Amino acid sequence: MLEVQFARARRVLSHGLAIVAVVVLSACADRRGGPIPYDVATFGTPDAPKVVPLEDNYRIAPLDTLSIKVFKMADLTGDYEVDLTGKISMPLIGEVQAFNITTAELDQRLTAKLGEKYLENPDVSVGIKSSTRRNVTVDGSVGKSGSYAVNGPTTLIQAIAAAGGVSENGNPRRVAIFRQIGGQRQAAAFDLTSIRRGEAPDPQVYAGDIIVVDGSATKAAQRQLLNTLPILSIFRPF
């Protein structure tokens, strides 16, 4: 009889501990945490982007600056900025749609237009002088991880919204931005719940930033990044 009572007591105790564990884990999933500091006032702007070759299939974006050369035609040769509608304007042929095509495709388009009425066998070359197609990466527990273009001032809330928002398993109170500053990757954590309530400012994000939302869907490598960075190394080389 005594053994039966002990067995029942053990079962009740085990059941109670399981409930407590679930409650504790649930609470941990919806609160701030980890060694990355929150609301860091000194989280600076990123380093200027390094000059790197564009991929061969790069597609022209609004506000890109193009270097266009037309052989033996100094009046047509020069730098042209793509306007917000994706067009460039050239002497003789006027406006030409350049958005979302490669430089080779624009080369062919300009060659055809110039050859229609004005030049015989025009020799055209097109290059990218400066690019504005710059991306921010959003990963972790969001609707759709990926890279998203930053074509103007963009905030953390806007960047996460572009990625489909925080997923059901995500923790909006634990979002990290990783940024290259002073030649070193640095990080700061942000609480989206506080930002949405107006209790904290919505920080600006920049091209090259990596945003990671914590949660059960966060990958092992991302979670390691969120959990193992020494707090004293944040905003210092690590």
Image (cartoon, rainbow, N blue to C red):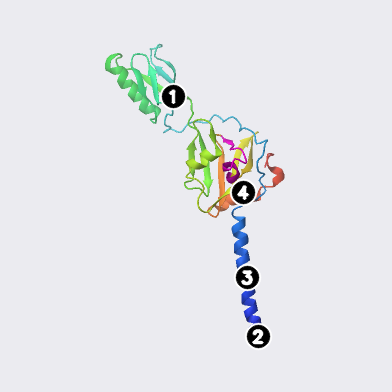
| Stretch of the chain drawn in magenta | 192-205
Identify the secondary structure beneath mark 4.
helix
Q: Amino acid at mark 2?
A: Glu
The residue at 62%/80% (across/down) is 8
Q: Amino acid at mark 3?
A: Gly
Identify the secondary structure beneath mark 1.
strand
On residue 16, the disc is: 3
The residue that disc 2 covers is 3
Q: CA distance from mark 4 to mark 3?
A: 31 Å
| Res 218 seen here | no
Depth order, front residue of 122/105: 105
Contact between marks 3 and 2 (CB within 8 A): the answer is: no
On residue 226, the disc is: 4
The residue at 53%/34% (across/down) is 154
Say which of marks 3 and 2 sits in front.
3
> Was residue 191 drawn as part of the magenta stretch in this picture?
no
Say which of marks 4 and 3 sits in front.
3
On residue 154, the disc is: none
Q: Earlier in the sequence, mark 1 or mark 4?
A: 1
Location of residue 52 with respect to 222 vertically, above or below: above
Q: Earlier in the sequence, mark 3 or mark 2?
A: 2
The residue that disc 1 covers is 127
Q: CA distance from mark 1 to mark 3?
A: 69 Å
Identify the secondary structure beneath mark 2.
helix
Residue 124 falls in which quadrant of the image? top left
